[in-house]
Image (cartoon, rainbow, N blue to C red):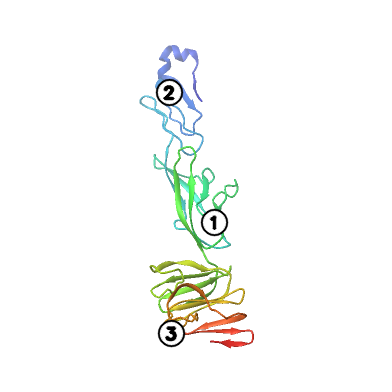
Amino acid sequence: MIKRILPHRTLLAASGVASIVTWACSSTVVTQDTSLSAATAGTGGTGPGGGTSTGGSGGVHVPKLKTIAIAPASPAVTEGATIQLSATGVFDDGGQKDITTFVNWSSSAQKAAVVSNMPTQKGLVDGLIVGTSTILAVDADSGLSGSEALKILPDVVKTGAGSDYTCAQSKSNRLLCWGTNAEGELGLGPGADNALPRVVLSDIKDFATGGTHSSALKGDGTVLCWGYNKTGAVGDGTLVNRYTPTLVPGLSNVVEIAAGYVHTCARQMDGWNG
């Protein structure tokens, strides 16, 4: 709402209205001008998007949202933990403002991470399982958005390494591996090396890494092996490399496993079997 406040009528007669009126505006950004053309100035939307209104030589400018930045950049959280993200609006007049509570938040991978839109918890992210998710902050008025790729990392309880690769067991009993995959040691199928941890198995009790092969003890007491198998380290009765976890036949009730450079051993309830 724009209103003009007129001085006493005796002053009007002496000087003329246009040169002495005082203008007031309900907008958060107010420009006072002695020109009547200022009365044409308007205001933007109710959200951070805003807008621009001009009126003659000296109008009212409502800063317009140009970009949204999410912080921290390249966020990461361990599974089962939370991280608070914030959104900053950058406006066309160079100003910046925290708009965390104005934007709508979303996660592209709901199974990996969820983000709150509750008024008192906007931008709070829960890491659910290991993986990645794109977190979006959208301004409804302007349609502008900002995004960051969130990494959900394992809450690691054990690590192991082979010649050129690494594996880790998370608190939620997932096995993740990364590095070289020339012999199938990552257990992710034939293909390129991986520079980031990727989930290989769930529900594992233990694992072991050899030179270029790996093994995992499942919750039911069975064993899976994969990778280099020219010496029979996988234990499936062949000498063919296995690029995905392969069940070791005839092996059950296992309570512990170990791996050498090109061999594997398993301890059953009644003793070792290698």
Verify CB contact (< 8 Å) between mark 3 and mark 2.
Answer: no
Q: Look at label 2 and name its amino acid.
A: Thr
Q: CA distance from mark 3 to mark 2?
A: 85 Å
Residue receiving disc 1: 113
Q: Residue at x 51, y 29 (%)?
A: 26
Q: Residue at x 41, y 79 (%)?
A: 163
Q: Look at label 3 and name its amino acid.
A: Thr
Residue 86 versus residue 258: which sits nearer the camera?
Answer: 258
Residue 263 versus residue 180: which sits nearer the camera?
Answer: 263
Mark 1 / mark 3, whichever is N-terminal: 1
Verify CB contact (< 8 Å) between mark 2 and mark 1.
Answer: no
Residue receiving disc 2: 40
Residue 203, compared with residue 55, is above or below; it is below
Residue receiving disc 3: 231
Q: CA distance from mark 2 to mark 1?
A: 48 Å
Q: How many marks can you see? A: 3
Residue 87 versus residue 232: which sits nearer the camera?
Answer: 232
Q: Look at label 1 and name its amino acid.
A: Ala
Q: Residue at x 54, y 72 (%)?
A: 169
Residue 184, compared with residue 120, is above or below; it is below
Residue 9 versus residue 221: which sits nearer the camera?
Answer: 221
